[in-house]
């Protein structure tokens, strides 16, 4: 038995759901190795917590300000009482002081990071799955801190892994379009994409719009989709993302954790930004020519976005190249490499 893994992550409209879903991939790997996974959440939603329980995870609620000293003290006490083998934290609010408090309690800590913003790093292991990840971001780390950098460590949930051998068809013109802008999308950029698709020239499209569990704008998006001339449907809190990605010829995505799922599935994608934390990921995507980064959604006029979508849908060579490269960059073994670093190295 490898014992218990505690995962400290939150999900709100502002934070999105990516931190929790990324941790779920690690929790699944821990369970597959014979361990028990416990989520400790200070901010979440019933739908998300039900999903975690359905995956066999225990869910505990923390009644404190996320990322505060009180949060760190309560989390450390809980982990010590349960004799946790490891504690994983994922979120911008788990900075250097938070990590220090956990380590001073004698815990083994994994910090899942996105851009080196925590200042001092005290965790035993820091994981940054972005292509732009570089050890220079972590100059202020402890001598014993180990870095796991790049999409070789991308954490994918187990439902994606059964699609490792899928044959990706890249048609001359993309007709199946998947829109997925994360679990929350607080500024409703999804609606802007829907309106741009309605203006996109060319042959008719079949569009699936995925709306996450923390998205407060679902009714407006559904109304807009119903008025579209193209076949457009909205799925709330989709339970079958791998199947939808396998169906899609092209995806329009935000720059969060979904990009690694799209890469693994080989889906040619247009990636826009909806939050500052996504800028680091975008830098890496552009430098490695993985997907086409189109900048901030809220700075793109609808007509311009429509033209970008139409041109990419008709450029088979570009879509084929990026689909092939994406599957080379993300091989689906990231969670096992992470487990090896935690348990064996």
Image (cartoon, rainbow, N blue to C red):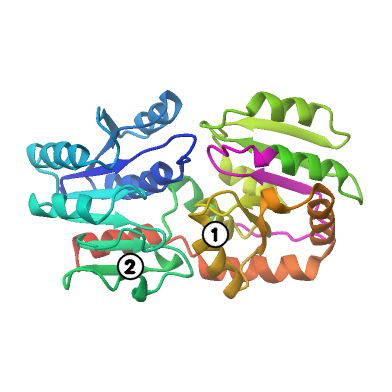
At 19% across and 65% down in the image, what residue appears? 344
Magenta segment's dominant SS is loop
Q: Nearer the viewer, residue 57 or 288?
A: 288
Q: Secondary structure at mark 2?
A: strand
Residue at x-position 87% and y-position 44%: 199
Q: How many marks?
A: 2
Regarding residue 162, the answer to whether it shows in the image is no
Q: Is residue 262 magenta?
A: no
Name the side, left or right, on which 299 lies relative to 308: left
Q: Quadrant of the C terminus?
A: bottom left
**Is residue 227 shown left or right of residue 37?**
right
Label placed on residue 202: none
Specify the quadrant of the image occupied by residue 108: bottom left
Mark closer to the observer (2, 1):
2
The magenta stretch spans residue 169: yes
In the displayed structure, does residue 276 sit left or right of residue 129?
right
Pick whichever, 305 or 229, lies toward us.
305
Q: Which residues are magenta?
A: 166-190
For residue 105, above or below residue 13: below
**Residue 148 percent coordinates (x, y):** 33, 67
Above or below — where is 58 with respect to 197?
above
Pointer 2 residue:
148
> Residue 292: image x %, image y %?
68, 64
Q: Is residue 128 left or right of residue 176?
A: left
Residue 46: percent from the left, percent from the top?
A: 41, 24
Work out whether residue 29 can be spotted.
Answer: yes
**Residue tagged 1:** 264
**Crowdedness near tag 2: few (<14), some (14–19) or many (≥20) residues, C-alpha within 10 Å:** many
Earlier along the polypeptide chain: callout 2 or callout 1? 2
């Amino acid at each position: 038995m490898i014992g218990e893994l505690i995962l400290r992550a939150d999900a709100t409209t502002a934070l999105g759901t990516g931190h929790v879903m990324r941790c779920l991939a690690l929790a699944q790997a821990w369970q597959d190795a014979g361990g028990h996974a416990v989520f400790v959440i200070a901010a979440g939603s019933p739908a998300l917590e039900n999903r975690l329980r359905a995956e066999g995870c225990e869910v505990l609620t923390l009644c404190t300000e996320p990322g505060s000293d009180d949060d760190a003290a309560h989390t450390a006490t809980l982990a010590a009482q349960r004799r946790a083998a490891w504690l994983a934290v994922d979120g911008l609010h788990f900075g250097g002081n938070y990590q220090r408090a956990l380590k001073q309690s004698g815990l083994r800590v994994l910090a899942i990071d996105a851009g080196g913003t925590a200042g001092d790093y005290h965790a035993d292991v820091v994981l940054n799955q972005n292509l732009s990840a570089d050890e220079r971001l972590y100059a202020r780390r402890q001598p014993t801190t180990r870095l796991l950098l790049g999409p070789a460590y991308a954490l994918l949930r187990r439902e994606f892994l059964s699609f490792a051998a899928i044959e990706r068809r890249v048609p001359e013109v993309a007709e199946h379009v998947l829109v997925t802008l994360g679990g929350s999308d607080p500024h409703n950029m999804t609606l802007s994409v829907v309106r741009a698709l309605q203006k996109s020239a060319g042959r008719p499209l079949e569009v699936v719009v995925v709306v996450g569990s923390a998205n407060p704008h679902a009714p407006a998006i559904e109304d807009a989709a119903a008025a579209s001339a193209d076949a457009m449907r909205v799925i709330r809190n989709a339970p079958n993302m791998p199947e939808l990605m396998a169906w899609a010829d092209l995806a329009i995505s935000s720059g969060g954790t979904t990009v690694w799922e799209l890469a693994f599935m080989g889906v040619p994608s247009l990636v826009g930004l909806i939050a500052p934390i996504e800028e680091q990921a975008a830098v890496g995507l552009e430098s490695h020519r993985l997907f086409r980064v189109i900048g901030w959604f809220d700075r793109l006029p609808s007509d311009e976005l429509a033209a970008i979508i139409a041109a990419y849908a008709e450029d088979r060579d570009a879509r084929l190249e990026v689909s092939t490269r994406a599957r080379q960059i993300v091989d689906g073994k990231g969670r096992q490499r992470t487990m090896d670093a935690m348990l064996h190295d």
